Amino acid sequence: MAINKDKRVIHIRIGNLSFPIEIPCEKEEAFRHVERLVNEELSRYQERYRGQSMEKYMAMVLIDIGMKFFYSERRNDTEPFIQAMEELSYELESALKNAE
């Protein structure tokens, strides 16, 4: 089996689960950040809603992070603004040409 020097195996721990993941070396910081974020959210839900199953806590975290991702995508969707700017630019250019 060939060793890929651009990738490495890291062990991610989420709650009481630990598993190896092969990742590109340059993405380890991002994976570790997400690992911390998920575990912080998990701890928050475990404190707030005591006595639930780990499966329920994981589902709560998944929904929470999914909602954050959803709103982040909506905030970063610049396509409608780019289209509007292109249309305005075209209209301005047309108006300036007609004014000459």
Image: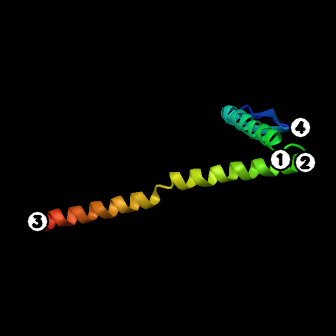
Q: Residues within 10 Å of mark 4 (few under 14, many from 20)?
A: few
Q: Earlier in the sequence, mark 4 or mark 1?
A: 4
Query: Residue sitting at 78 percent across and 38 percent down?
Result: 22
**In the visual, does 40 lie left or right of 16?**
left
For badge 2, the amino acid type reads: Ser
Residue identified by numbered label 1: 57
Nearer to the camera, 88 or 3:
88
Distance, label 2 to label 1, CA atoms, is 6 Å
The label shown at residue 53 is 2
Residue identified by numbered label 3: 99
Q: Position of residue 75 (x, y in %)?
A: 52, 52
Mark 2 secondary-structure assignment: loop
Query: Residue sitting at 44 percent across and 61 percent down?
Result: 80
* Callout 2–callout 3 Cβ contact below 8 Å: no
Distance, label 3 to label 1, CA atoms, is 65 Å
Distance, label 2 to label 4, CA atoms, is 12 Å
Q: Earlier in the sequence, mark 3 or mark 1?
A: 1
For badge 4, the amino acid type reads: Asn
Distance, label 2 to label 3, CA atoms, is 71 Å
* Callout 2–callout 1 Cβ contact below 8 Å: yes
**In the visual, does 78 lie left or right of 48?**
left
* Callout 2–callout 4 Cβ contact below 8 Å: no
Q: Which of the image's four quarters has the N terminus?
A: top right
Q: Does 85 sit above or below residue 55? A: below
Residue identified by numbered label 4: 16
Q: Earlier in the sequence, mark 2 or mark 4?
A: 4
For badge 3, the amino acid type reads: Ala
**Residue 18 visible at all:** no
Nearer to the camera, 18 or 57:
57
Res 27 quadrant in image: top right
Q: Position of residue 61 (x, y in %)?
A: 76, 47
Q: Earlier in the sequence, mark 3 or mark 4?
A: 4
